Image (cartoon, rainbow, N blue to C red):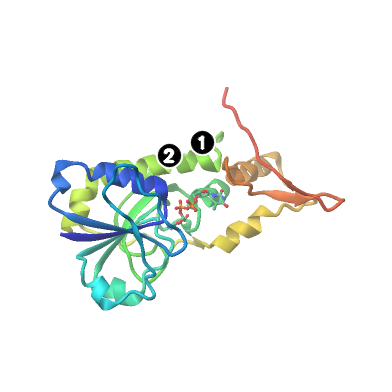
Amino acid sequence: MNVCVITDNQFIYEQFLLILKDARYQSESFDFFSSPGNPLRQEPGCQIRPGQVDLKQATQDFFSRYELFLSLHCKQLFPPTLVKNHRCINVHPGFNPYNRGWYPQVFSILNKYPAGVTIHEIDEQLDHGPVILRRQVPVYSWDTSLDVYTRIQQMEVELLKEFLPVLLSGAYRTFQPETEGNVNLEKDFKKLCRLDPDQKLTWQEAIDFLRAMTFQGYRNAYFYDKEGNKVFVEIRLEKD
Ligand code: 0FX
């Protein structure tokens, strides 16, 4: 079977290549793409050369080459012609229907909705279609966004390892999530980043806010001091 894998996430890409080394997948054909402007690093010694695809510009001819489209953190919304006429599956780093959209674990730390992984068929709305499977991951009081995200990525890899044969064959039942849930966009995250030094919070709210925004390698939360300096803030938590 011909599978089109579209991913903008280097870690998931590399892990997926490892999964595909299993003998069960040797007779299947996987093509890899990322979104324009976001090239994947080619793995040393790996024959697979990832391409880039702009799904808005892609032709019917391109779509008809594949029997399955797999989004492993693809940053593009799949167009209606694609999702209506082809089987499309999304691996999403959130527990649908809660905090669909951008950076789910950040919002789960803040609003206490479940965090986890959802593998679902793609429809025209963001992280919305019928659920094939989903798993929750715990969020501890000492977790930062990075800690929860790392747990989520491990869970994504575990689920792909276990269920890829079923995803490929289509031998699964789906269910509709219990509610429409809620969606967060990139702009919602960006808005959160700017702290208001005069905002009144409890300690618990302040700690939860800062740990939701702490992800080593990214400068997220910031404030402007009286002199106009922009100052980034993160938190370190240590469980006894
Ligand atoms: O690939 P991904 O983990 O996932 C994102 C969306 O959250 C997801 O819902 C969507 N399906 C997918 C296509 O794109 O995103 P990322 O690799 O850009 O970021 C990973 C984490 O890094 C994120 O959860 C929080 C953290 N991060 C990222 C950026 C860019 C920050 O804390 N600050 C940032 O500025």
| Residue at the extreme top | 240
Please name the amino acid that badge 2 sits on.
Arg
Residue 175 located left or right of residue 211: left
Residue 217's quadrant in the figure?
top right
Q: Secondary structure at mark 1?
A: loop
Is residue 204 placed above or below 75 in the rendered structure?
above
Q: Residue 81 bears which disc, if any?
A: none
The reply to whether residue 137 is in sight is no
Residue visible at 62% across and 43% down in the picture: 208
Percent x, y of residue 211: 60, 41
Percent x, y of residue 79: 36, 73
Distance from the alpha carbon under mark 1 to that under mark 2: 11 Å
Q: Are marks 1 and 2 in contact (CB under 8 Å)?
A: no
Q: Residues within 10 Å of mark 1 (few under 14, many from 20)?
A: few
The reply to whether residue 182 is in sight is yes
Is residue 124 placed above or below 167 in the rendered structure?
below
Location of mark 2 (residue): 151
Q: Please name which of the two marks, 1 or 2, marks the residue nearer to the observer.
A: 2
Residue visible at 50% across and 38% down in the picture: 147
Numbered marks: total:
2
Q: Earlier in the sequence, mark 1 or mark 2?
A: 1
Residue 88's quadrant in the figure?
bottom left
Q: Residue 140 bears which disc, if any?
A: 1
Q: Using the image as rendered, state which of residue 101 and residue 34 is in the foreground.
A: 34
Q: Is mark 2 within 8 Å of ligand 1?
A: no
Please name the amino acid that badge 1 sits on.
Tyr
Q: Residues within 10 Å of mark 2 (few under 14, many from 20)?
A: some
